[in-house]
Structure formats: structure tokens, C-alpha cells
């Protein structure tokens, strides 16, 4: 009899995105699903937090990076002065959420 190897399931992009939404909600904010009709490659989430703190966040599966078009969109938003980043791990989500939490308390 052959033993079946048990897979350790890697998180998917939706798992990272779901974790982000949960953590933003924990801070009292909302992580809106962001789409822009007629404009592709915008970040996945528009995070709106107390104190006027707003950030755009692109979620990726672990080890994945934004596409060239997504990088272009991220850079356009940064040039306009917006807080925009991408995450591909739960640890990165925690870092971003901690940073946003600190910004909330400064205002």
C-alpha cells in the first residue's frame, strides 16, 4: 500500500486579500474592493481608516509580483502622493496594517 503525501497548502491570493480585509476591519476601517471600469490593473483594495487614512493595496499570491501594468498603476498613484503598496504574505499584511494604524493615531 502506497502512502499519500499530505500537501501543506500554500495560501492563495484570496487568502492574503481576506486576511487584509479582516485586519483593516480590526482597526475600524473598511477595505473596499476597488475596480475602475475601463481601467485595468488598479490595486485590489482601497483601504479607508479612521482619521482620514487611505491606502491602495494590491494583493498577490505568495511569491508572485504585480504585472508590469500593475507596477505602472502603482507608480502613477505614488506620484500623485497616495499610499500604495503590494503584499504577498500575511506578514507583509501585518506590517502594512501596523504602519497604517500608526498613521491613524498621528492624526
Image (spheres, helix red, strand yellow):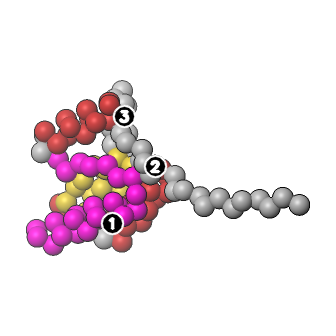
Q: Residue visible at 12% across and 45% down?
A: 81
> Residue under circle 1?
94
- Please, what secondary structure does the residue beneath circle 1 have? helix
Q: Position of residue 57 (x, y in %)?
A: 31, 50
- Please, what secondary structure does the residue beneath circle 3 have? loop
Q: Is residue 78 left or right of residue 72?
A: left
* Cα separation between marks 3 and 2: 12 Å
> Residue under circle 2?
61
- Tell me the crowding category of disc 1: few under 14, some 14 to 19, or many 20 or more residues within 10 angstroms, Cα based: some
- Please, what secondary structure does the residue beneath circle 2 have? loop
Reading the chain from its start, which is encountered first: label 2 or label 1?
2
Q: Is residue 28 above or below residue 40?
A: below
Hey, which residue is sitting farthest top in the picture?
38
Split into 4 quadrants, where in the image is the N terminus?
Answer: bottom right
As for residue 13 lying within the magenta part, the answer is: no
Which labelled disc corresponds to residue 6?
none
Split into 4 quadrants, where in the image is the C terminus?
Answer: bottom left
Hey, which quadrant is residue 31 in on the image?
bottom left
Q: Residue visible at 52% across and 56% down?
A: 11
**Residue 45 in view (yes/no):** no
Give the extent of the magenta segment: 82-107
Reading the chain from its start, which is encountered first: label 3 or label 2?
2
Q: Is residue 34 left or right of residue 5?
A: left
**Residue 22 in view (yes/no):** yes
Q: Is residue 42 left or right of residue 53?
A: right
Q: Residue visible at 19% across and 35% down?
A: 76
Choose between 36 and 74: the one closer to the eye: 74
* Cα separation between marks 3 and 1: 23 Å
Reading the chain from its start, which is encountered first: label 3 or label 1?
3
> Residue under circle 3?
67
Amino acid at each position: 500500500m502506497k502512502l499519500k503525501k499530505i500537501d501543506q497548502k500554500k495560501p492563495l491570493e484570496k487568502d492574503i486579500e481576506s486576511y487584509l480585509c479582516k485586519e483593516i476591519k480590526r482597526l475600524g476601517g473598511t477595505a473596499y474592493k476597488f475596480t475602475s471600469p475601463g481601467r485595468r490593473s488598479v490595486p485590489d483594495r482601497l483601504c479607508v481608516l479612521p482619521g482620514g487614512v487611505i491606502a491602495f493595496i494590491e494583493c498577490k499570491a505568495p511569491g508572485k509580483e504585480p504585472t508590469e501594468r500593475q507596477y505602472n498603476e502603482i507608480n502613477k498613484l505614488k506620484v500623485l502622493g497616495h499610499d500604495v503598496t503590494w503584499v504577498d504574505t500575511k506578514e507583509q499584511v501585518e506590517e502594512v496594517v501596523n504602519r497604517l494604524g500608526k498613521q491613524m493615531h498621528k492624526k
